[in-house]
Image: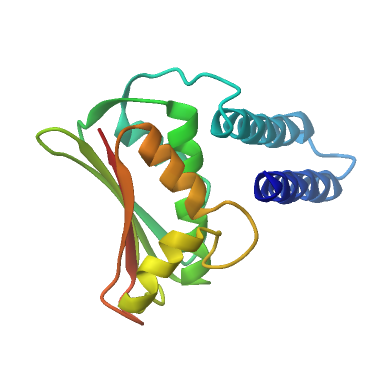
């Protein structure tokens, strides 16, 4: 519970700082303050909703979605000059807890963007298997030594070590869908992949 409270405080403080920065950047003549603040408040509301689901205080609601749409939405949050984000998930549909899966994707994309720094490629994909769907977030970043993969999954964290629930959140989301989370990398300098399996 202490970890949960610390992670929630960290994530919500980040959102508040982002809101304050955006307010400072808007200036008195901007015509976008309401739009920017609404987006930040919506993200904070999503964080709170996820933490309530995480501790079992709010029941998840699931419905069928087109996975590609969710991946495209997530991709827009991290696209920037020098960072290419490719989405490949045509026609894949599945019954999911959409807010929870959105949060898991945000965590993995944040990790990938941090691993890449100023330049690189992130690939978001989804594939249908006979009894499940796999959602994959891959990057061309620094990679992970194979012997570190089990430790990263066990410790959770976010951004390969910064405070927060990070991979623990992603794993919890995957398990809530009857699946799991796995990490793959050929080694340092070879990029990495995170795979969410949804049943």
Residue name at image x 55 percent, y 59 percent: 158
Residue 125 shows up from this direction: yes
Residue name at image x 35 percent, y 79 percent: 145
For the C terminus, which image quadrant?
Answer: top left
Residue name at image x 37 percent, y 39 percent: 175
Q: Residue 127 location, x and y as percent?
A: 19, 42
Furthest-right residue in view?
A: 28
Furthest-left residue in view?
A: 130
Which picture quadrant has residue 149?
Answer: bottom left
Residue name at image x 42 percent, y 60 percent: 153
Depth order, front residue of 71/61: 61
Against 17, residue 139 (above or below) is below
Q: How many marks?
A: 0
Q: Residue 129 location, x and y as percent?
A: 13, 38
Furthest-bottom residue in view?
A: 188
Furthest-front residue in view?
A: 1
Q: Residue 31 location, x and y as percent?
A: 77, 33
Against 39, residue 164 (above or below) is below
């Amino acid at each position: 519970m202490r970890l949960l409270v610390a992670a929630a405080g960290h994530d919500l403080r980040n959102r508040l700082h982002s809101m304050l920065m955006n307010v400072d950047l808007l200036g008195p003549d901007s015509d976008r303050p309401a739009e920017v603040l609404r987006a930040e408040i919506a993200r904070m509301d999503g964080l709170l909703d996820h933490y309530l689901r995480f501790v079992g205080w709010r029941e998840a609601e699931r419905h069928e979605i087109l996975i590609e749409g969710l991946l495209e939405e997530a991709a827009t949050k991290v696209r920037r000059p020098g960072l290419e984000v490719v989405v490949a998930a045509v026609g894949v549909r599945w019954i999911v807890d959409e807010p929870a899966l959105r949060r898991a994707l945000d965590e993995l994309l944040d990790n990938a963007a941090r691993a890449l720094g100023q330049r690189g490629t992130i690939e978001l994909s989804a594939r249908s298997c006979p009894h499940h769907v796999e959602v994959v977030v891959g990057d061309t970043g620094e990679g992970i030594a194979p012997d570190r993969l089990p430790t990263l999954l066990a410790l959770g964290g976010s951004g390969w070590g910064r405070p927060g629930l990070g991979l623990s959140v992603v794993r919890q989301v995957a398990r809530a869908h009857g699946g799991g989370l796995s990490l793959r990398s050929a080694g340092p300098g070879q990029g990495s992949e995170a795979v969410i399996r949804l049943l």
